[in-house]
Image: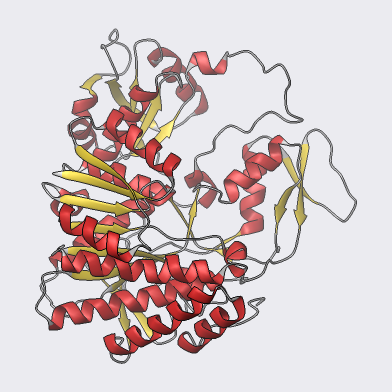
């Protein structure tokens, strides 16, 4: 496939133009934030939104309270929100982030003075703990445009269910859905701590939005069907999945159960309950998969397409679709978290192969475009509209380049280490460790038989596949075979079943 879709012209932002931002601050932080941003030559500040009581008039116009953020941003043409509030004011910071999301602004955080001046720890790490870095600066491209009006049209006044709601994408979907004025948000997650955290955060940021936390595993098909029937959601975003490629190589049965059979469970439940939209989040690893993770996600895609076909034939109101995209930078246990921990321990940071590339997107970008893709499919007047959308992720990024940018952003000079070599205080080493089981050097977003076409929405491609849609009866047979293999917990049987039903799966996945 081409490195980036070019069949349809796309708009590119004007180069070298400072973004317009609004500052969200309190009376105690506004002056310091203005001074820091002015000295750093950051974005063009258009005014101040006050989190809490309004401060004194200053060089920047006062734009009102958090409730006025969307109106102010639209009037000023702002694209970013710079949030400067103390870390101790968790609820206020979350409310500010929620206001920025509702206004369609890219939120960036600036440390408050009290956070900059906190005492050093009694037992410091070999290096200072890395400060958070905005993932967008590492990707090296501007954020993709988002149609907030379309998202609001999908979500406003409706009941929204999110599976995997405690994960990186799921929790961001929950936040952005809550900002769009739903009737209710249902958070479904099997990890207790993650569910507790997103439920708490959502309650603090959006106290007026009805919500319900559901400690549940979608693999339990009977319980899933019962829960979804009683909730009767209008829109379902399915983000629950196992994602760690090397780990799933050793646990293929669990990957089949969670990624493939769990998808069937929640999709069938959504259709039975009359949900208007079911949107499954997929991955570029599902294209010509070399891993268990990729193969199980490919089968999940085929399952959703088959169920959509069956629903259409039965005259059911539900429409099922897939949104496929690459890596999300800054997600839980992703490369940035790993590198930050390695840097805090003194380094080196690790890269598996100097040639490896990946498509990257930030968490807010990905979540917003997933919702917009759902809205795009829903509003299509063509009943045969494509059931797969692919996010425009730009050009693939070399992981080694990303690692070097990460080091420089923390003030260190990166050095690629030879075996046995170490680094000095102002340098950090990058050690090449070798590709891991199931990994590919380069991912792809489409199959050879698939073509990208304009979806009518910015940053989202519609996928046109040659040949007929997956036959529902054939997919039923494949899933029954996979379920029988997974039940044995025999890794060889599971891999053989995956190979039978994903014949393009390439093993051992080292190229």
Please name whichever residue, 44 or 328, is drawn nearer the observer in this view of the structure: 328
Towards the viewer: 433 or 445: 433
Q: Which residue appears at 70% of the width and 64% of the height?
A: 353
x then y, percent, for residue 94: 35, 29
Q: Quadrant of the C terminus?
A: bottom right
Among all residues in the image, which is located at the extreme right? 420
- Quadrant hosting residue 222: bottom left
Q: Nearer the viewer, residue 383 or 149?
A: 383
Q: Is residue 346 visible?
A: yes
Q: What colour-coding does the image apply?
A: secondary structure
Residue 139 location (% of width, % of height): 51, 52
Q: Is residue 9 left or right of residue 418?
A: left
Quarter where residue 29 is shown: top left
Left or right of 49? Residue 239 is right
In the rendered image, the vertical position of residue 258 relative to residue 186, given as above or below? below
Residue occupying the point 21% across, 34% down: 70
Q: Position of residue 500 (x, y in %)?
A: 49, 89
Decide: is 82 above or below 217. above
Where residue 386 appears, as percent x and y from the top left, is: 24, 77
Residue 471 seen from this side:
no
Residue pictured at 33% horizontal, 84% vertical: 476
Q: Is residue 140 above or below residue 396?
A: above
Left/right of residue 308 with respect to residue 138 in the rendered view: left
Total residue callouts? 0
């Amino acid at each position: 496939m081409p490195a980036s879709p070019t069949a349809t012209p796309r708009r590119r932002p004007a180069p070298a133009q400072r973004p317009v931002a609004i500052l969200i601050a309190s009376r105690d932080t506004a002056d310091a934030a203005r001074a820091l941003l002015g000295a750093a030559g950051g974005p063009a500040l258009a005014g101040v939104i006050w989190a809490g009581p309004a401060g004194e008039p200053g060089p920047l116009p006062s734009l009102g309270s958090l409730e006025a953020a969307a109106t102010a941003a639209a009037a000023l043409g702002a694209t970013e929100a710079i949030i400067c509030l103390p870390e101790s004011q968790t609820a206020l910071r979350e409310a500010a982030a929620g206001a920025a999301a509702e206004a369609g602004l890219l939120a960036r955080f600036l440390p408050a003075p009290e956070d900059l001046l906190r005492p050093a720890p009694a037992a410091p790490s070999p290096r200072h703990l890395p400060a958070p870095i905005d993932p967008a600066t590492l990707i090296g491209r501007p954020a993709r445009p988002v149609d907030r009006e379309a998202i609001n049209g999908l979500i406003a006044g409706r009941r929204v269910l999110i599976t995997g709601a405690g994960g990186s994408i799921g929790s961001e979907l929950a936040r952005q859905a809550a900002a769009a004025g739903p009737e209710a948000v249902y958070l479904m997650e099997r990890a207790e701590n993650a569910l507790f955290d997103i439920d708490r955060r959502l309650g603090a940021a959006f106290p007026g939005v009805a919500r319900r936390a559901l400690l549940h595993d979608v693999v339990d098909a009977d319980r899933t069907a019962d829960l979804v029937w009683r909730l009767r959601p209008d829109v379902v975003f399915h983000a629950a999945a196992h994602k760690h490629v090397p780990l799933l190589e050793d646990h293929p049965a669990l990957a089949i159960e969670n990624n493939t059979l769990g998808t069937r469970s929640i999709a069938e439940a959504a259709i039975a309950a009359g949900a208007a939209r079911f949107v499954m989040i997929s991955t570029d690893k599902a294209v010509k998969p070399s891993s268990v993770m990729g193969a199980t996600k490919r089968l999940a895609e085929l399952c959703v397409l088959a169920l959509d076909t069956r629903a259409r034939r039965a005259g059911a109101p539900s429409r099922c679709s897939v949104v496929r995209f690459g890596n999300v930078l800054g997600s839980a246990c992703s490369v940035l978290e790993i590198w930050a921990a390695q840097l805090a321990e003194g380094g080196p940071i690790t890269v598996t192969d100097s040639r490896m590339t990946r498509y990257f997107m930030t968490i807010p970008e990905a979540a917003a475009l997933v919702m917009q893709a759902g809205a795009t499919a829903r509003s299509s007047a063509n009943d045969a509209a494509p059931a797969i959308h692919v996010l425009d992720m730009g050009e693939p990024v070399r992981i080694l380049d990303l690692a070097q940018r990460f080091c420089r952003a923390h003030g260190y000079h990166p050095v690629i280490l030879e075996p046995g070599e170490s680094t000095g205080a102002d340098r950090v080493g990058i050690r090449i460790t070798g590709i891991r089981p199931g990994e590919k050097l380069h991912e792809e977003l489409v199959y050879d038989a698939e073509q990208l076409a304009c979806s009518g929405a910015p940053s989202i491609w519609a996928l046109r596949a040659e040949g007929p849609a997956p036959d529902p009866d054939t997919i039923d047979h494949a899933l029954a075979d996979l379920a029988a293999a997974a039940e044995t917990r025999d890794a060889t049987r599971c891999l053989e079943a995956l190979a039978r039903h994903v014949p393009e799966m390439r093993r051992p996945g080292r190229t």
